Amino acid sequence: MSYLKQISDKELKEGIEHFIQEAKGKYVPSVTLDTVIFGFHDNKLKVLLLRFAQTAHFILPGGYLSKDEDLDMAALRVLRERTGLDNIFLEQFYTSGKKNRTSNSIVSQLMKDLLGNLPADHWFNQRFVSVCYYALVDDTKVNPKPEPFFTEFKWFDIEAIPVLLYDHNLIVEKALKRLQTDLDTKLVGSKLMRDSFTMNELQKLYEAVFQHPFVRTNFQRKMLSLGILERLEKQYTGKSHKAPYLYRFTKDPLED
Amino acid sequence: MSYLKQISDKELKEGIEHFIQEAKGKYVPSVTLDTVIFGFHDNKLKVLLLRFAQTAHFILPGGYLSKDEDLDMAALRVLRERTGLDNIFLEQFYTSGKKNRTSNSIVSQLMKDLLGNLPADHWFNQRFVSVCYYALVDDTKVNPKPEPFFTEFKWFDIEAIPVLLYDHNLIVEKALKRLQTDLDTKLVGSKLMRDSFTMNELQKLYEAVFQHPFVRTNFQRKMLSLGILERLEKQYTGKSHKAPYLYRFTKDPLED
DNA sequence: TTATATTGTATCATTATGATACAATTGTAT
DNA sequence: ATACAATTGTATCATAATGATACAATATAA
């Protein structure tokens, strides 16, 4: 659920220098990708964040666009690198391009401390436009890989996202808004639920995404009327009340 | 409504060379902007397209991102340059990033013919990621400026868009889909209508955007129930039937 | 057996939507 | 004047969707 690695300034500096060396020829300049990775756990909507090495601050998982790579492929690769997951549901939802969105940040200061004063045309002094995707994942299957810049990953409740680097708080907000409409129109709920679940669990997902309660009986009627759920056997939990049915999503509503 | 200019190969070549000279220091590499400019005229939804000089092909109005410019500002500037309009309604809706989206096109061939074989790292051989905006304008007020690459501009009915250069047909399709949802959710209709209009004219707009008819009486009931229209005096057209009321949008539904 | 929590379903009122009817109005034709 | 055609504004009816509430049916604990 969480990963933590210690790294020395020297290791970090070397890692960064090595990265920059490689990046120059490999990546399309000026373009980054950021991903808002949503999971659903403990009846809460969660977002995966990375702690930037040597700082107390978190950041969205992101990456760069290879010169020979489609943008969507790059987003998938970034997700694979960060979460170890393939076949992820991904949607592009926004491109962030304010001119000062990454300047004057703690990261710039850290880079200066580690690498000295960088020339104006240095990789890290580039202006980046960031194409943003959101992903829906089964967070129990996420198995993140270590990477020089990031020494910790952590799932945050959507209601308790800390102050993030750059303009990433804004990006998370936009991702949530898009998730809300997609949950209604594209019925992407299946991507966040386990294979089978109770109606109550599904309701908790909707309440977490929309951040308001639903009337239980009406929610159930609505969901069943959509024709996307299949009723399975009952789930006996040992609790002292009627056992709920389990459901699963019949077919993927996204397949056309 | 339409603009046409003749230009010689020599003029075009000089124009392009001059542009490239300027562009290198001025613009963020790898990033372009494309705009789908919608207008509403003759009860049809129209899109403004530019003919690429020396070709028979049309293209979306686009531009580049200046190094000291926010992305949204760049989109506004591009629109101002192309249409002469300020205070335009603009929405970012998609970022196009397939690796080959601009290669192997007629434009590449034209550039080769004009400028000779370009080095691999030449400005025009860059790979561009394009951030796409759509705009809603009063097309009677559009007063486009000439520009070296483009020698003709023309409004096309959305139902009769020709084959465009690059992936621009795809971009127009995505713009239309987004316009459909925004017309429903953000009620952006006011941006495409003249100041006052009849209910029938408004219905024609909706039918053009959604590309299907609405039942007149129910459409009227729905529109009036939204509480965004103000009824004005009747419009006597001299036609032999009841004169319709004129309406106007009360307040901008987008102002929060 | 009783009590408690929760679930599945039914019901009713209200609102939204689709389909249709019809009177009112404007100008033209007779 | 009168009849007519075209179109508009509004009403009405049936149906569907939604919000609010009631209640019987479990499943286990006491």
Image: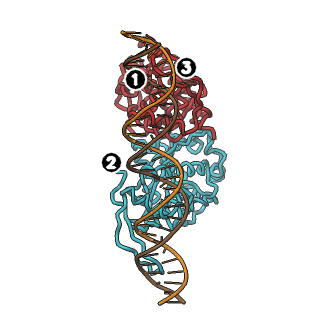
Chain colours: A cyan, B red, C orange, D brown
- Residue A97 lies in quadrant: top right
- Mark 1 and mark 3 on one chain: yes
Q: Which chain carries label 2?
A: A
Q: Which of A158 and B72 is in front in this view?
A: A158
**Which quarter of the rendered picture does the C terminus of chain B lie within?**
top right
Element carrying mark 2: loop
- List the residue tagged with mark 3: B141
Q: Position of residue B141 (x, y in %)?
A: 55, 19
Nearer to us: label 1 or label 2: 2
Query: Does residue B103 appear in this view?
Result: yes
Q: Where is residue A87 in the image (x, y as percent from the top left)?
A: 37, 56
The amino acid pointed to by label 1 is Phe
The amino acid pointed to by label 3 is Lys
Q: Is residue A167 above or below residue B233?
A: below
Q: What residue is drawn where x is 58% and y is 24%?
A: B195
- List the residue tagged with mark 1: B58
Q: Which chain carries label 1?
A: B
Q: Position of residue B103 (x, y in %)?
A: 37, 32
Residue A256, label in figure: 2
The answer to which of marks 1 and 3 sits earlier in the sequence is 1
Label 1, label 3: how far apart the Cα atoms are: 22 Å
Query: Does residue A154 appear in this view?
Result: no
Nearer to us: label 1 or label 3: 3
Q: How crowded is mark 3: few (under 14 residues within 10 Å), some or many (20 or more)?
A: few
Element carrying mark 3: helix
Q: Where is residue B240 in the image (x, y as percent from the top left)?
A: 45, 17
- Mark 1 and mark 2 on one chain: no
Label 1, label 2: how far apart the Cα atoms are: 31 Å
The amino acid pointed to by label 2 is Asp
Q: Nearer the viewer, residue C1 or A228?
A: C1
Q: Nearer the viewer, residue A128 or A207?
A: A207
